[in-house]
């Protein structure tokens, strides 16, 4: 029953984004990030009411649905730009991978929140206010304000992780892990940050236990 509820909530988010894209004229890049943030934050809560095996199954199910959607162009609001569609596939895939390697619910949550909120806000802020601070990485446009948004958001998430998880961690991790994640967000282009960033966070936090 809880798994069905999780699927229903994700479906509602996708329908909402599709509505904004088709009927309200919201740019597809923004609807992609709305889905990225909302779904990611919701998924981050899954270990607290779903089993690891159920999360792995849902990851596989969402991966299948996304591949079909890309093929049939069902949810254009999240992959209207074809070259970015594999980023959404990696997003679905990494959920299952995190469910395999995370040793604690809070580690899964921190990894997903940094992926969804920090990465999502960095893109939104960079798109809105980053025009005057742009730079190129491997031919892809980044912005200083976007990178700083990622760093400070990731640091805030790490502080919350330290405050609420009561798990072992190094105080220096609160600083250098956001720095590393922000650097990785710059160099992991074409959607690969959707898998590399949460794996980095999960592996570092697991090794700190």
Image: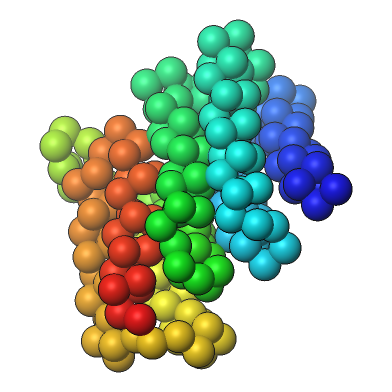
Residue depicted at 85% across the width and 48% down the height: 1
> Which of these two is toward me, 168 or 128?
168
Could you tell me residue 173's position as x and y percent?
A: 28, 81
Q: Is residue 124 left or right of residue 195?
A: right
Farthest-out residue, left: 138
Q: Residue at x 50, y 89 (%)?
A: 166
In the picture as drawn, the residue positioned furthest to the front comes out as: 53
Q: Could you say which is closer to the camera, residue 196 or residue 209?
A: 209
Camera sees residue 33? no
Name the colouring of the figure: rainbow
Q: Can residue 163 be seen by looking at this rendering?
A: yes
Q: Residue at x 45, y 85 (%)?
A: 167
- Where is residue 85 shown, x and y percent of the image? 45, 25
The image quarter in which residue 44 lies: bottom right
Quadrant housing residue 62: top right
For image coordinates 62% across by 24% down, the residue present is 65
Quadrant for the C terminus, please: bottom left
Residue closest to the eye, 29 or 43: 43
Of residues 11 and 51, the one drawn nearer to the viewer in this rendering: 51
Query: Which image quadrant for residue 14?
Result: top right
Q: Is residue 42 above or below residue 180?
A: above
Residue 131 located left or right of residue 107? left
Q: Position of residue 26 (x, y in %)?
A: 64, 33
Q: Position of residue 90 (x, y in %)?
A: 42, 36
Give the vertical position of 164 relative to 107 (above or below). Answer: below
Q: Residue furthest right?
A: 1
Q: Is residue 194 above or below residue 107?
A: above
* Relative vertical location of residue 198 with respect to residue 82 in this rendering, above or below: below
């Amino acid at each position: 029953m809880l798994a069905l509820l999780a699927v229903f909530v994700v479906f509602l988010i996708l329908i909402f984004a599709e509505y904004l894209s088709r009927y309200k004229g919201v740019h597809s890049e923004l609807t992609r990030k709305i889905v990225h943030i909302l779904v990611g934050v919701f998924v981050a809560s899954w270990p607290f009411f779903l089993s690891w095996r159920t999360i792995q199954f849902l990851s596989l199910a969402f991966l299948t649905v996304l591949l079909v959607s890309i093929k049939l162009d069902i949810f254009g609001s999240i992959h209207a730009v074809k070259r970015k569609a594999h980023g959404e596939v990696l997003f679905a895939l990494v959920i299952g991978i995190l469910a395999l390697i995370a040793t604690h619910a809070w580690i899964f949550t921190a990894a997903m929140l940094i992926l969804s909120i920090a990465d999502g806000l960095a893109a939104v802020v960079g798109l809105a206010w980053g025009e005057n601070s742009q730079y190129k990485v491997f031919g892809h446009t980044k912005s200083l304000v976007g990178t700083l948004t990622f760093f400070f958001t990731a640091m805030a998430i790490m502080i919350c992780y330290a405050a609420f998880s009561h798990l072992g961690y190094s105080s220096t991790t609160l600083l250098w892990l956001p720095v590393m994640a922000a650097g990785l967000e710059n160099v992991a282009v074409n959607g690969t940050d959707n898998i590399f960033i949460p794996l980095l966070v999960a592996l570092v936090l697991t090794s700190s236990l």
